[in-house]
């Protein structure tokens, strides 16, 4: 099975930052790498399943304004 790694930028509503972080921390294979002063999160998604469905699910998190895919890499199974 292939291994997927995607990096994302999420733009947040400032008052909902903690809510967004709670949701992301519950997503399998998700990791927050930073939060900018202008309320954007740097997030990676990793796993053996396609990460794009989890990325799409982030659009429904209360407080997420936008989700931008920065990169998506697929490592073939050995």
Image: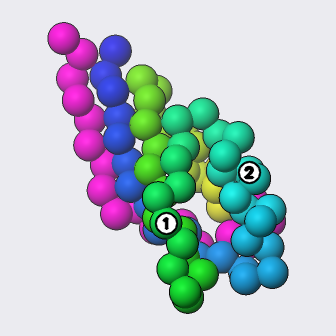
Query: Mark 2, mark 1: which one is toward the viewer?
Result: 1
Element on which disc 2 rests: helix
Drawn side of residue 59 relative to residue 61, left or right: left
Residue found 73% across the figure and 71% down from its top: 17
Residue 71: within the magenta?
yes
**Residue 56, placed above or below residue 65:** above
Residue found 68% across the figure and 70% down from its top: 64
Q: Which residue is mark 1?
A: 34
Q: In the figure, residue 50 lies in which quadrant?
A: top left
Q: In the figure, residue 58 lies in which quadrant?
A: bottom right
Checking the image for residue 23, the label placed there is 2
Q: Residues within 10 Å of mark 2 (few under 14, many from 20)?
A: few
Element on which disc 1 rests: strand
Drawn side of residue 35 relative to residue 48, left or right: right
Q: Is residue 52 visible?
A: no
Residue 52: within the magenta?
no
* Magenta stretch, residue numbers: 60-78
Give the image location of residue 62, x and y in percent. 80, 65
Q: How is the image coloured?
A: rainbow
Q: In the depicted view, which residue is nearer to us: 12 or 32?
A: 32
Q: CA distance from mark 2 to mark 1?
A: 15 Å
Q: Residues within 10 Å of mark 1 (few under 14, many from 20)?
A: few
**Residue 61, placed above or below residue 38:** above
Residue found 55% across the figure and 86% down from its top: 37
**Residue 1, placed above or below residue 60:** above
Report the magenta stretch's main SS: strand
Residue found 31% across the figure and 22% down from its top: 2
Give the image location of residue 36, x and y in percent. 51, 80
Drawn side of residue 53 relative to residue 18, left or right: left
């Amino acid at each position: 099975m292939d291994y997927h790694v995607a990096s994302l930028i999420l733009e947040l509503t400032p008052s909902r930052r903690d809510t967004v972080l709670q949701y992301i921390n519950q997503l399998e294979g998700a990791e927050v790498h930073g939060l900018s002063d202008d309320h954007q999160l740097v997030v990676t998604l990793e796993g053996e399943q396609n990460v794009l469905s989890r990325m799409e699910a982030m659009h429904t998190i209360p407080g997420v304004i936008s989700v931008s895919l920065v990169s998506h890499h697929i490592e073939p199974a050995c």
